[in-house]
Image: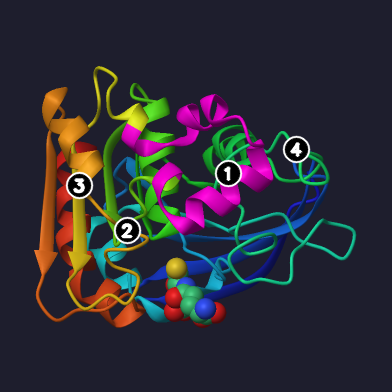
């Protein structure tokens, strides 16, 4: 596993850690970040997964959102993966919404991406085993949240693993990737032209399933990517027709940035903690 602790910062009483390791699934060196609360009460600690958006690494959320205050307040560990496989030998694209920094949290089937772009299996299996070994006194309870591409990733991972994740939330998420430019570009490239294969990676299709965890979504009205990339209509229609509980909130005047994320994060943590206790 070659796990190496490369940073450790005290933050709000807990520890903000960053690790590097060689990923067998992705076939490359990776980093991830992990927050461990102080756990002064020696309680069982649940785990929230955070998935970031396009162009991010695991640093954006830990550097810019201020989430550590909430994780310490609620005594919850937070795991932050990178957004794609990395390295000079890993396929890439010159545009910012494809390739490295834009893995879309799926398992690619098309060349030259299939060898490394397996973010779904990396997170749900390899990183999951690592997380379990690193969170002391882990309660075994997990939930998942994310932003934009990562908001979509959180919905897909949560809805594909309904027994495992107790709650799902997303800030300005892509909701119907098969119908918006970012998603069409990524799915065509990673999964191929046959749109039948897209369905298992599309939150608007998965929401037609049964036994879904509760879902909470926040979208800013002044988000430059809304509604073109982040349209909610089809997702909400499918959720409603299938009786899936989605709390979709629009917030006046907010954009797509980490200023928006930082503003509404407490609301999201409080929502998750209802199901993680
Ligand atoms: N093309 C722009 C926009 C990309 C963008 O807004 N990315 C969002 C996720 S979709 C983000 O979280 N950016 C990193 C940040 O704001 O720290 C860029 O390269 O920064």
Q: Quadrant of the C terminus?
A: top left
Q: Where's residue 187, x and y in %?
A: 58, 44
Q: Where's residue 13, x and y in %?
A: 35, 72
For residue 251, above or below residue 231? below
Q: Mark 3 sits on what residue?
A: 233
Image: magenta residue range: 178-204
Query: Gap in Å between the C-alphas at discs 1 and 4?
Result: 10 Å
- Contact? badges 3 and 4 (CB < 8 Å): no
Q: Earlier in the sequence, mark 2 or mark 4?
A: 4
Q: Residues within 10 Å of mark 2 (few under 14, many from 20)?
A: many
Q: Is residue 90 left or right of residue 241?
A: right
Taking the magenta stretch, the answer to whether it contains residue 189 is: yes
Q: Mark 2 sits on what residue?
A: 230
For residue 162, above or below residue 138? above
Q: Residue furthest right?
A: 89
Q: Mark 4 sits on what residue?
A: 110
- In the picture, the disc for residue 187 is 1
Beta carbon at label 4 within 8 Å of ligand 1 = no
Q: Residue at x 41, y 26 (%)?
A: 161
Look at the image and tell me whether residue 224 can be seen: yes
Label 4: which secondary element: loop
Judging depth in this view, the residue of 250 and 25 nearest the camera is 250
Taking the magenta stretch, the answer to whether it contains residue 40 is: no
């Amino acid at each position: 596993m070659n796990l190496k602790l490369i940073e450790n910062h005290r933050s709000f009483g807990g520890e903000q850690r960053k690790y590097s390791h060689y990923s067998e699934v992705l076939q490359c060196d990776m980093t991830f970040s992990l927050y461990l609360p102080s756990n002064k009460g020696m309680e069982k600690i649940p785990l929230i997964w955070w998935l970031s958006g396009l162009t991010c690494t695991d640093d954006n959320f830990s550097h810019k959102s201020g989430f550590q205050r909430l994780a310490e307040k609620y005594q919850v560990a937070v795991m932050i993966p990178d957004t794609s496989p990395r390295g000079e030998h890993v396929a890439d694209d010159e545009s910012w919404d494809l390739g490295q920094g834009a893995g879309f949290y799926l398992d690619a089937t098309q060349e030259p991406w299939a060898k490394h772009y397996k973010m779904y299996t990396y997170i749900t299996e390899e990183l999951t085993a690592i997380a379990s070994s690193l969170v002391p006194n882990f309660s075994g309870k997990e939930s998942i949240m994310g932003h934009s591409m990562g908001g979509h990733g959180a919905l897909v991972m949560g809805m594909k693993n309904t027994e495992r994740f107790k709650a799902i939330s997303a800030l300005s998420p892509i909701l119907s990737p098969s119908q918006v430019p970012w998603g069409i570009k990524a799915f065509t490239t990673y999964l191929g032209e046959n749109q039948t294969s897209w369905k298992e990676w599309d939150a608007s299709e998965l929401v037609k399933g049964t036994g879904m965890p509760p879902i909470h979504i926040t979208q800013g009205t002044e988000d430059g990517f809304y509604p073109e990339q982040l349209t909610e209509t089809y997702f909400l229609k499918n959720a409603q027709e299938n009786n899936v509980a989605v709390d979709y909130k629009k917030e006046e005047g907010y954009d797509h940035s980490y200023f928006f994320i930082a503003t509404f994060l407490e609301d999201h943590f409080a929502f998750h903690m209802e199901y993680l206790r």
